[in-house]
Amino acid sequence: MTIPAPIEDFLGCRTPETWVRMAKQRLPELLLDHANCEKKAASTALSLMFRYPQHDKLATRLSKLAREELRHFEQVSRLIRARGIRHARAPVSGYAAGLREACRNNEPGRLVDTLITGALIEARSCERFALLAPQLPADVAALYRGLLASEQRHFEVYLSLAREFDARIDNRVAELVAVEAKLASGPDTVFAFHSGPPA
């Protein structure tokens, strides 16, 4: 599958081939962490709605996004059950923590940075679905092809919301893109859907 051009243009690097090879070899772990990622994505959208109740447009758009993320969780969970994979706690990679550490603490920077990192996470998911779908078993490939378009749409939602709160974010986007690229391509202590290649 081809990586959508807006996604490839946005990300600072392509996922290393070593990570893709590892994902093919560790499919149960990939799916378990993917399910966890979908839950976290829904939780992030909901937490933003609660944290910023004064922003009605943000709440409206993220409410729909959260529902979609939960449907994705259900889809991945059905696939996990169909494959007889036992549910287990997903490992924690340095990816999400690294992005959180790069975010500003004071408002409105905190909100803008959270939205940009949301866009980065969705863009990376979209890219990895495109890279993995041609190389995985038919049932997983079908799911990943089906999710790709929605991940691109979620990327666009987060980025457009960030621009609505700060129209001059290009420099900040570039800074966070560089952070994300380092996390996605550098060695990681664990294997996860959004990790770098395991060290």
Image: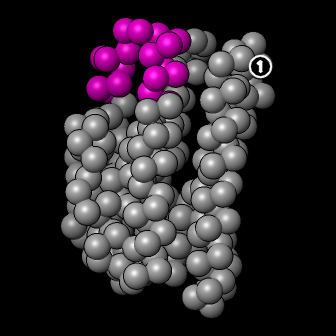
Q: Residue at x 50, y 13 (%)?
A: 164
Q: Residue at x 40, y 82 (%)?
A: 138
Q: Where 159 sits versus 139, above or below?
A: above
According to the picture, the residue beneath numbered tag 1 turns out to be 53
Q: Quadrant of the N terminus?
A: bottom left
Q: Residue at x 67, y 43 (%)?
A: 66
Q: Is residue 136 magenta?
A: no
Residue 43 can be seen in this image: yes
Q: Where 139 sits versus 187, above or below?
A: below
Q: Is residue 171 magenta?
A: yes
Which of the two residues, 169 or 161, is positioned nearer the viewer here? 161
Q: Main secondary structure of the magenta part?
A: helix
Residue at the limit of the structure toward the bottom, as seen here: 84
Q: Quadrant of the C terminus?
A: bottom left
Which of the two residues, 93 or 11, is positioned nearer the viewer here? 11
Q: Residue at x 46, y 61 (%)?
A: 146
Instruction: Assign a secondary structure to mark 1.
Output: loop
Q: In the image, 5: left or right of 140?
A: left
Magenta residues? 158-175
